[in-house]
Image (cartoon, rainbow, N blue to C red):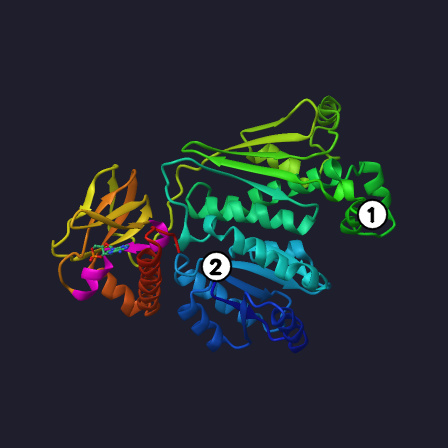
Amino acid sequence: MGSIGFINSDKELKSRVEELFEVNEYYEIVSMDNRHDISDFLDYELSEILIINFSDVSRSLIDTVVKKLKEDSWLHSFGIIGVYDDDDEEEELLDRYSDLNIMVMMSQRRLKSHLIKSLDIISRERHIIFQKVLIDNLVENASGTFLIESDVFIASIYASIITTALSQRGVIAKDKKMFMQLVLSEMIVNAIEHGNCGITYEEKSEFLEKGLNIVDLIAKKCEDPAIARKRVYFEWAVNNQETVFVIRDEGSGFDVNKLKSKIEEEGALALHGRGIKMAVKLAKEIRYNKKGNRLKLVFENDETVHKETPGGFDTEEVLTLNKGDVVFREDELGDFLYYIIAGTYNVYVEEVLVGRITPSDVFMGEMSFLMQNHRSATVIANCPGKILKISRNSYINAIKKYPHYAILLSKLLAKKLVRANDFKVRGEISEV
Ligand SMILES: Nc1ncnc2c1ncn2[C@@H]1O[C@@H]2COP(=O)(O)O[C@H]2[C@H]1O
């Protein structure tokens, strides 16, 4: 996962966060409290996760991140874990920084219980998120299921993982991402609260009126092992036209007709949270099963969204390939580098399969491109795919403008080498 950047100038918070990482061998944290270090870190580490203190008095630190993102949002496609102190309003912060890919926001109180836990989930599911390790194919269907425990914070992480992936794939517009994330996370929270934990609206209101937090009510319910064992099943499937989500819980359901008539009576669904209100606006279809413990939401894909490509290459030619198409042949002169938008590709040397290239490699054809000589292998599309053809001139110009493109290419080559070593040792084609 590489280093995780922590942007913050609050000394007390710094030591609290670093303490959490000390006992964890898996992640390495780099704390930064000045613009210069942040700039360098973002350019050269190309980190996947940043932790940002959004209550930082030194706002210019956050502005540095925003500026970098504006320069090249493809290169800096990291997810953000936001922390704030209790004087700040989470919703206000989310609104203010809606351009940033905030995967989860947590108050400083929750750091101990949720920071490492959130990182673990993002790290486990990272294959479906980050642009540079993106899912194989734009044209093929993709689907998956998450099993979610009764933890309200975790719900929002899963919702953001999937909406981040959809937005990066160009399935939903960036400005819609935040709303879809909110809808899904509220629906999952409903399934946890009212489904698995069996909390009634009356019980919830009573608890809240006492000034208590719903998180504590859920924790209290989970003292019963039978409730604690229950999970929410969050399924997603995306095809060329639409994205379907199914949220199912293990509770006893509720009277769907009663909800329907309440909805008709109250028009704007006054009694039911912002999640349902937004879902009604955004979704093409919302359907509960009879029992009321399974919700299906269908969203139409946004056809007008352009999938992000690396900055500086916007005018290059996009090639569409079919299975079996030859991208280039061994020994040809290699003047172009290819950015992989979609598809998987087999690599043959003297007709022997030696490797497989996927979008996680980001580029292909970099070897002869860099060394100005002949292609080291023949590359053939393994399924329908899309690639961006980048000329030497364009790449060199991009490096002049953003020197870290050179670092990115070196990092990718190093990864490929690790994989090739793996292939030599184990004789199998693995994904790094
Ligand atoms: N063993 C390998 N595993 C994965 N990709 C490879 C391997 N060997 C060559 N390639 C890729 O195939 C490309 C063939 O053309 P290039 O030599 O320009 O650049 C090469 C790399 O992008």
Left or right, 254 with respect to 232, comes to: right
* Quadrant of residue 29 within the rendered picture: bottom right
The part of the chain drawn in magenta is 358-371
Residue under the point 39% across and 39% down: 304
* Quadrant of residue 375 within the rendered picture: bottom left
Left or right, 188 with respect to 166, comes to: right
Residue under the point 66% across and 51% down: 153
Seen from the viewer's position, the closer of residues 146 and 98 is: 146
Seen from the viewer's position, the closer of residues 224 and 268 is: 224
**Does the magenta portion include 368?**
yes
**Does the magenta portion include 302?**
no
Residue linked to disc 2? 78
Ligand 1 quarter of the rendering: bottom left
Q: Is mark 2 within 8 Å of ligand 1?
A: no
Q: Secondary structure at mark 2?
A: loop
| x then y, percent, for residue 134 | 41, 49
The amino acid type of the residue labelled 1 equals: Leu
The correct choice, above or below, for 17 with respect to 204 in the image is below
Q: Nearer the viewer, mark 2 or mark 1?
A: 2
Q: Is residue 66 visible?
A: yes
| x then y, percent, for residue 382 | 28, 41
The correct choice, above or below, for 135 with respect to 60 in the image is above
Seen from the viewer's position, the closer of residues 409 and 224 is: 224
Residue linked to disc 1? 208
Residue under the point 33% across and 67% down: 402
| x then y, percent, for residue 142 | 44, 38
Q: Which mark is residue 411?
A: none
Left or right, 62 with respect to 170, comes to: right
The C terminus sits in image quarter: bottom left
